[in-house]
Amino acid sequence: MVAVHAQSVQPPLSDSEKALHVLNRLAYGPRPGDVDAVKRLGVKRYIEQQLNPDSLPLPPDLANRLSALPTYQLTATQLYQQYGPPSFPPNSATPEEKNMARQRANKDITPQTHFSRLWLATESPRQLQEVMTEFWFNHFNVFEGKEWVRYWNGEYEKDVLRPNALGNFRQLLGAVAHHPAMLYYLDNWLSSGAGTPEAKGRFKGLNENYGRELLELHTMGVDSGYTQADVISLARILSGWTIDEKGMKDGQPAFIFNPRRHDGGDKVFLGQTIKGSGYQEGEQALDILARHPATAHFVAAKLVQYFVSDKPEPALTEKLARRFLSSNGDIKAVLHTLFDSPEFWARSNYQTQFKTPYQYVVSSLRATATPVLNVRPIDGVLNQLGQPLYGWLTPEGYKFSEEAWLNPDALLRRINFVNGLSNGKSPIARSDPPPPVPGAPPVAAAPNTAAPIDPQQLQQTLAPALTPHSLSTISAAPANLQVGLILGSPDFMKR
Amino acid sequence: MKRRDFIRHLGLTASGAILIPVGLSGCVVAPASKPQAKAKPVPAAPIAMVDSPLSYGSPLQRPHATGDGTPRMIVVFLRGAVDGLNVVVPHGDHNYYKARPGIAVSRPGTQNGAIDLTGYFGLHPALQALQPYWDDGRLAFVHASGSPDMSRSHFEAQDYMETGTPGQHNTRDGWMNRMLGVMPSSSSPMQALTLGESVPRILTGRAVVANMPTGRDATRPTLIDRPEVSQAYAALYAEDAALGKSYRDGISARKELMADASSSEQKMANNGAPLPNGLSIDTARLGRLMRSNPDIRLGFVAVGGWDTHTNQGNGNGQLANRLRPLADGLTTLARELGPAFNDTVIVVMSEFGRTFRENGNGGTDHGHGNAMWLLGGNVRGRTIHGSWPGIDDKSLNEGRDLAITTDFRSVLATLAEKHMRIGDPAMQKLFPQYGAGNPHALNLLV
């Protein structure tokens, strides 16, 4: 009752505040005019639209730019064929050949993957889909710097995470488990059942890495009751789930189940006996995990932490976990319940979450309508702020809490970054000049297309975020500092 | 090695159980006279096989030097796995020359040859700037050290060294951050400084860490350094408790950096001296900041470019070109620390070593054991710590790499305990699953 009372003394959010709130939580902050547009539409209808991204067409210009990215169109197998190491060990490829393959991937695939993510994050009207794509990327993190992951992380995001971001959890979990980026990153591709015919060389022995993270990070969560014996059972169940190196060369899909490396014995997993039946065992284990109450609870808690508060209220987590179970892991249904909850709308949770570097950078690009013509400066600033895109090494992904991101140096770096945006001369809005042609005169960089940001316009874009104290401080400052002050304000650091 | 020193060496290694067997045999017997070398006679070679008896050097006896009494520690991480066998060269062993016909650092006394350290070990000639520190007993190495985890992946191996938990993927924080947590607390936002852009794994965690921009531009004034701008933001942040404190801490750290930069750069301009290159610019800054502010207890800097799979070179070439500025950066750091050098231990480490034999491309591939470097006013220097496993075919790890006889945590735990004065219970937090019962009784300090 105390909590209800505490909430009742706080005035409910105004329409403008509600509009800003959904734009900050279901999207990466408002672009110019967005707050008014959501007010006109109504927050309920806005949420409905966001939960049904297919109802929102991509702007043709954005769709065209995406389809003009050559590597964005390729399957995992094609990426492997066209960019992968010339061949896999043990083989005749020299370190130079492998280095060259790595450099080509760095030069071609990586910027295109980053462009696609940033264009969609800054411009896609399907903002919740983008937010949830990032959420799941962190939940099912892979690290771009681990050798072959670089070839596949863009495709993983595009074909596994984004289409399933608001879909069914079991389907998402299964798609992740089959993708070479994950099989490689968590070493399952190397894992073989003990004593199986092809368990030799580098494929010798059982690798527990994926099995462990699948339990600890992807589904049930640490300390949820599984044991080391369950980890081993799961690793045995998934033995033989691997990458088809040879087959990919002939255009076969990346995933293959290799029965000659699968431990065919019966296993006891989470108290259930799983009969040795080959590939099907893995699907059965994923079924068990996806409908386990601990999984429902773990995913619900993470969603509450992302969308509501760093310190999730247990009652809301409980409610979402029940919805997760009753809907068979329907992510959209769970989010529906979340966005309907009084906690989501409580003033005590309004403008209280400290943005991650990624949220901060993307929201500042949106608020200023800065076009992303060059990803390198964005990669640079995200690197400086400690959250390089696709750059978290370990499988738990980036954190979303204030504790993880609020530090003195980072705050000043954020302020310096937005001051660089405010004059409209940011290198982000200027594409790199084409590489010089021998003999021809050098081509100048494309002219900068962004105009200086108008402080009045920006203030209007972000109005419900700015406290009276901030407004008066900003308006007392010299005009040329105002844009930087708005974007560098504590108000804009929060969502 | 003098008899007296040998006995003392024995005494100190005997406390570390893992060091005894190989250490003893290695210490007295020259590799050429080992049984296996006899069993498989070495084919006649054009150069005479003059093998020196293994010697770890003779530490200089000297009293404990004092600074301001605040212990400090700086980690220099060589990312990409430096070739420790070409840093501290076993020039006394013909196996070294056999395995590395193109890239071995030649014997002392020859052109571009190793700088002799102990009669058996020598220093890469590009590290000549460090020789005075060796000579006066302030530089030591722990050879054949490294991570017990067998990963040959840079990312995994670095991760394990930075978290201090080899083989465990899920440690959330780095050991230097945990060290901050077990040191006496201070309100300063600058207890730990890292050079470079983001906070590295080794310093991520609960405790606040300041990172310092690198390069010549680092102390170039930015908008926020203009008083009217920082005041405008100060006003903006005045009413926000958490963010306001962060903002004020950030500004005060920034002011400190700028003040230091302006004074010292002015001094340099007055002397007409050119600015040092690369790493030295940053280590000079780090050294000065740590000297003038005893709140700063930990420093970290990463230096890349050690993944020499091709054209590594010997006394000259690619690796030499990397080592030279590193040596300059380290001597600059030592010099700029001033009296605080006596309270500082600088540890240079890398994620793993490289293959013993050179590959077909004049380089080396990912290997295992490496040398850790220790530099500081009270380092027990002029000696090679640890124990030498040997580099004949039978002694190599998996037949290809220098074996590891000292766990890197043993070195770090010794420094944490004896130098940073971290007590026993806290050691468990610092290196979980590697606390009591493990040998961190290396005699690394004066």
Image (spheres, rainbow, N blue to C red):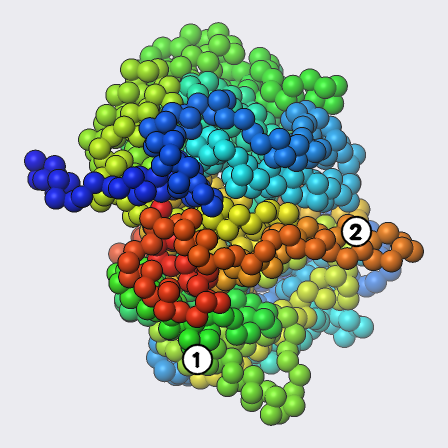
The spot of residue A143 in percent (x, y) is 54, 40
- Circle 1 marks a residue in which chain? B
Left or right, A135 with respect to B326, comes to left
Check disc 1 and give the amino acid type: Arg
The spot of residue A18 in percent (x, y) is 31, 39
Between A109 and A246, the one lying in front of the other is A109
**Image position of A195 with respect to B441: above or below:** above
**Number of marks drawn:** 2
Marks 2 and 1, Cα distance to the nearest angstrom? 46 Å
Q: Return the residue found at the far bottom.
A: B270
- Tell me the number on the disc at residue A435: 2
> For numbered disc 1, what is the local secondary structure?
helix
Mark 2 in CB contact with mark 1 (< 8 angstroms): no
Left or right, A434 with respect to A240, comes to right
**Image position of B295 with respect to A26: above or below:** below
Left or right, A250 with respect to B138, comes to right
Whether residue A55 appears in this view of the structure is yes
Answer with the quarter of the image where residue A190 lies: top right
**Image position of A400 with respect to B4: above or below:** above
Mark closer to the observer (2, 1): 2
Query: In percent of the image, x 37 and y 73: which residue is there?
Result: B231
- Circle 2 marks a residue in which chain? A
Looking at the figure, which quarter contains the N terminus of chain B?
A: bottom right
Between B45 and A285, the one lying in front of the other is A285
* Label 2 crowd (10 A; few <14 / some 14-19 / many >=20): few
Determine which residue is flagged by label 1.
B291
Answer with the quarter of the image where residue B90 lies: bottom right
Answer with the quarter of the image where residue A184 lies: top right
Query: In percent of the image, x 47 and y 41: which residue is there?
Result: A394
